[in-house]
Image (cartoon, rainbow, N blue to C red):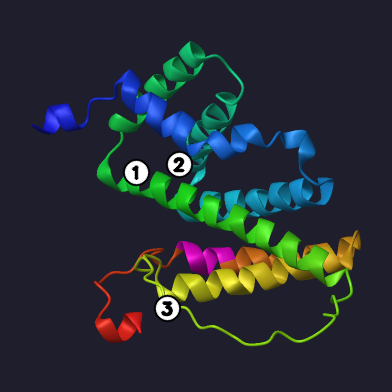
């Protein structure tokens, strides 16, 4: 029943932690660009300011504590990580439905924001290199039709994060100009505030026309 569905076993832990975090464990933090690390840190700090403003100090501190706990399991032993995650799960179970929704929304936005930072950094780096000139044109173009999963994010959320990514690219392009960073971080905070107040997922099942 419901009790069984909510049980957190060591097998669940193996799949959830080591399945989903495999790519992170394979890519050491020190191998990341200092520019990208700095961009992520600044951006997540701005998101934290938005969460504090929207949910209040107590909710912000609860979310920040959980974030720190999740970060702490990287690189530790299997037993230590399992113990930390189990304690975190027990804390989450004591929260009300609205409080859990706030935690989920905060982490969803944080992951979207980190993805936007990575995409912005990739764009910034590609623009720094001149385009490659092909020796000759291709003989032909082959169109391939493929099935794709339904986009779960709302159109508004996608547009907002496109704007966020553009703002992040601009931050990287302007370098260390402190005044520019203040101005751009104000814009980032505004965009993240709007993103916080909109559902990140669609509220209705998309139609065939939507998919097309």
**Residue 4 can be seen, yes or no:** yes
Figure quadrant of residue 165: bottom right
Q: Nearer the viewer, mark 1 or mark 3?
A: 3
Residue at the left extreme of this rendering: 1
Gap between marks 1 and 2, in whole Å? 8 Å
Question: Which residue range is magenta in the image?
Answer: 192-196
Q: Is residue 129 above or below residue 22?
A: below
Please report whichever mark, 1 or 2, sits nearer to the chain's N-terminal start: 2
- Identify the element where label 3 is drawn: loop
Q: Does 139 appear in magenta?
A: no
Q: Are marks 1 and 2 in contact (CB under 8 Å)?
A: yes
Q: Main secondary structure of the magenta part?
A: helix
Q: Is 5 positioned to the left or the right of 112 in the image?
A: left
- Identify the element where label 1 is drawn: helix
Q: Residues within 10 Å of mark 1 (few under 14, many from 20)?
A: some
| Residue at the spot 34% in from the left edge and 80% down from the top edge | 211
Q: Can you identify the residue that label 3 sits on?
A: 145
Percent coordinates x, y for residue 144 in the rendering: 47, 78
- Identify the element where label 2 is drawn: helix
**Image quarter in which the C terminus is found:** bottom left
How many numbered discs sit on the rendered protein? 3
Percent coordinates x, y for residue 193 in the rendering: 54, 64
Q: Which mark is residue 99?
A: 1
Q: Does 195 appear in magenta?
A: yes
| Residue at the spot 58% in from the left edge and 17% down from the top edge | 76
Figure quadrant of residue 138: bottom right
Q: Which mark is residue 59?
A: 2
| Residue at the spot 47% in from the left edge and 61% down from the top edge | 196
| Residue at the spot 34% in from the left edge and 19% down from the top edge | 10
């Amino acid at each position: 029943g419901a009790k069984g569905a909510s049980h957190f076993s060591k097998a669940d832990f193996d799949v959830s932690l080591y399945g989903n975090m495999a790519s992170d464990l394979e890519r050491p933090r020190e191998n990341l660009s200092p520019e990208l690390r700095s961009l992520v840190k600044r951006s997540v700090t701005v998101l934290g300011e938005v969460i504090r403003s929207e949910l209040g100090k107590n909710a912000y501190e609860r979310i920040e504590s959980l974030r720190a706990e999740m970060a702490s399991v990287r690189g530790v032993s299997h037993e230590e990580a399992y113990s930390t995650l189990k304690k975190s799960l027990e804390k989450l179970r004591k929260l009300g439905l609205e409080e859990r929704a706030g935690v989920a929304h905060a982490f969803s936005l944080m992951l979207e924001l980190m993805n936007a930072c990575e995409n912005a950094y990739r764009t910034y780096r590609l623009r720094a290199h001149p385009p490659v000139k092909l020796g000759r044109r291709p003989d032909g173009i082959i169109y391939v039709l493929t099935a794709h999963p339904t986009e779960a994010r709302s159109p508004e959320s996608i547009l907002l994060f496109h704007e966020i990514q553009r703002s992040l690219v601009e931050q990287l392009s302007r370098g260390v100009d402190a005044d520019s960073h203040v101005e751009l971080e104000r814009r980032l905070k505004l965009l993240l505030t709007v993103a916080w107040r909109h559902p990140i997922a669609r509220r209705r099942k998309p139609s065939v026309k939507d998919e097309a």
